[in-house]
Amino acid sequence: MAVCIAVIAKENYPLYIRSVPTQNELKFHYTVHTSLDVVEEKISAVGKSLGDQRELYLGLLYPTEDYKVYGYVTNSKVKFVIVVDSSNTSLRDNEIRSMFRKLHNSFTDVMCNPFHSPGNTIQSKAFDGIVSGMMVQTASTV
Amino acid sequence: MIFYSIPSSLLQVTELCGAKRLGFFNTPQFFVALKLLAAAQSELPIHLESITANLPLPRFTGLKNEPEMRYAVVPPSADGQGAQTGTGTGTGTGSVSWTPADRRHPEDHVDRKVSSGGVDLIPAAAERPRCCEIRGSFRTSSSERLDQQGLVDSPDDAPWRITEEQLEYYTNQFRSLQPDLGALIRGTIAKNFFTKSKLPIPELSHIWELSDVDRDGALSFPEFCVAFHLIVARKNGFPLPERLPPTLRTGLLQSDRDQDSPDTPEVRQRGVLKVLRVLLQVEGSSRSYSSTSVEDAMKKAEEPPTPPPRPQKTHSRASSLDLNKLFQQGTPGTTRRPPPVLQRVSSGCIESGVKPEDRGPRSRLGPSSEDLETASKQVPDVVSLSQAPQKPVRRKYHAESQNLETTPTKPAQKPPSKQKREIQTAIRKNKESNAVLTRLNSELQQQLKVSRLVSARATVPASCV
């Protein structure tokens, strides 16, 4: 169960950010922003060694005391970032991977929609539904 | 009712239009309320009779729905034409008087609109606010409109059911975009088409999400009908559902089952996309998650077929080396083109058969080979041989022309594949070694002869002695 889910475009601006509404929403946004650096690092490092083949799932980017940040990059350099609460029962790697896979699938669906121009923020209800399904269920949906 | 500025008369308005009694604003109530608001805003007393007066539009701050406003002008003028004063019995009876004048006027207006535009969904929007005000005569008006345009609008019944006339209309529209009913309409075409309906883009986006069930970025005929139907419903004021209503969904499923996937490229592509998706999702955990998206899959699929381009120069150089060797091996001193070619053909038929078939150089060589053919008489014999040697003959010309002209012609066509090149080089090497060995052989044989002679001479004196 994620606390914050973000989709960042290739040019590193956010296409979609959703977090559990608490007081520190800004903190989550900041965390996502700083994790982008780690993502860039990972992309550039792996890219040189393997060439074309690159693992899309980046894994744990950045653990802090409160939460963990996981990353995932598509081949078109669109980044997905999931922030998970550490106090939560530690989610297995597979679960995180499946969350990213779902995100990627519904992101592809959004891209296939001809009324969505790439580069705009994602306003699809289906995408919202998928994301809400992954977020921590305590707070009401925004 | 958030957007108007006379809160004190609100209660009066709601009471009069009957919404209070019903508990909610249904469409007739809504329009009566709007009329009363207009009256209130123009300082007229709020009574049901005032509905029939020729009033200006009620002013709402922040409301900008231009087409609706345009058509809202119609009823006041219709009223002026000859309406009776409303009775005080509440709800919609006061507006019954609108019926005759009302329907006549908007129909003329609407007919003009229909004749002007191709796919103009605005008539539907225009009709609905006007004719739906009349509760009693509701069905008759809707049936009349049915006859006129075939755009059925029976919102009080299941709004999510597509009727026959609607289906016919949608079919015609589909045909105008894509003559084959079994084929797909691509996303961009559908986008342009549906944008004509002047719905806001987020709503159109949502409609697309609802109707593109197989997520292929294109609309099949049933999907198109669903999308069109949703647009029509939305234009008539229905809120878009979160999920596809069951009546529409069954229509989609049925037609999917009925259709025997016609063999069009789009359908095949769709099938391929689906299969790829399934395959890649099954592949799953061990592989990298690049396989989860169709885009990545397509990229991967594209990679193998295009081998990296290889420089043709080395190949031609190698073949020129071959030629030189042949010159040495064969008839030394002859530099004319036809004889070495002949020799080549006679000796190296096998090799020529294996040479890769470059269509590009062949086409280019066409004229050059023809020139050479006209020049020499022997070449037609060569050419009249089987097809396989003919190609390498031209290739030989190509190499020769390259050598003679010393033009590094970089071929623009696709280079031969790796395997063939390997075979080529292997065969060339074998040929070279063969040549070396034959030379060695001949030398050794000569030496043998010499030694025999020597031994014979040696033995003779021995025998002589």
Image (cartoon, coloured by chain):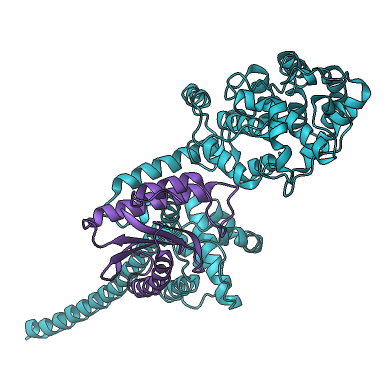
Chain colours: A purple, B cyan
Q: Position of residue A54 (x, y in %)?
A: 35, 64
Q: Residue at x 60, y 22 (%)?
A: B162
Rendered position, B372 above or below B250: below
The number of callouts visible is 0
Q: Taking B194 as reference, is A47 above or below it?
A: below
Query: Quick check: B290 left or right of B88?
Result: left
Along the line of sight, the residue nearer the viewer: B452 or B138: B138
B73 left or right of B436?
Answer: right
Q: Position of residue B364 (x, y in %)?
A: 62, 62
Figure quadrant of the N terminus of chain B: top right
Q: Which sits in the foreground, B97 or B313? A: B97
Whether residue B235 sits left or right of residue B187 in the image: it is right
Residue B119 visible somewhere in the drawing: no
Q: Looking at this rendering, what residue extends furthest in the right direction?
A: B81
The quadrant in which residue B374 appears is bottom right
Considering the image in quadrants, where does the C terminus of chain B appear?
Answer: bottom left
Q: Provide residue B145's location: percent of width, then percent of height.
A: 76, 19
Residue extending furthest front?
B8
At 84% across and 32% down in the image, what residue appears? B113
Residue B241 % position (x, y): 54, 34
Is residue A67 in view? yes
Q: Quadrant of residue B199?
A: top right
Question: Taking B194 as reference, is B249 left or right?
Answer: left
Q: Is residue B418 above or below residue A37?
A: above
Camera-nearest residue between A54 and B381? A54
Q: Is residue B38 above or below residue B89?
A: below
Residue ID at (49%, 64%): A14
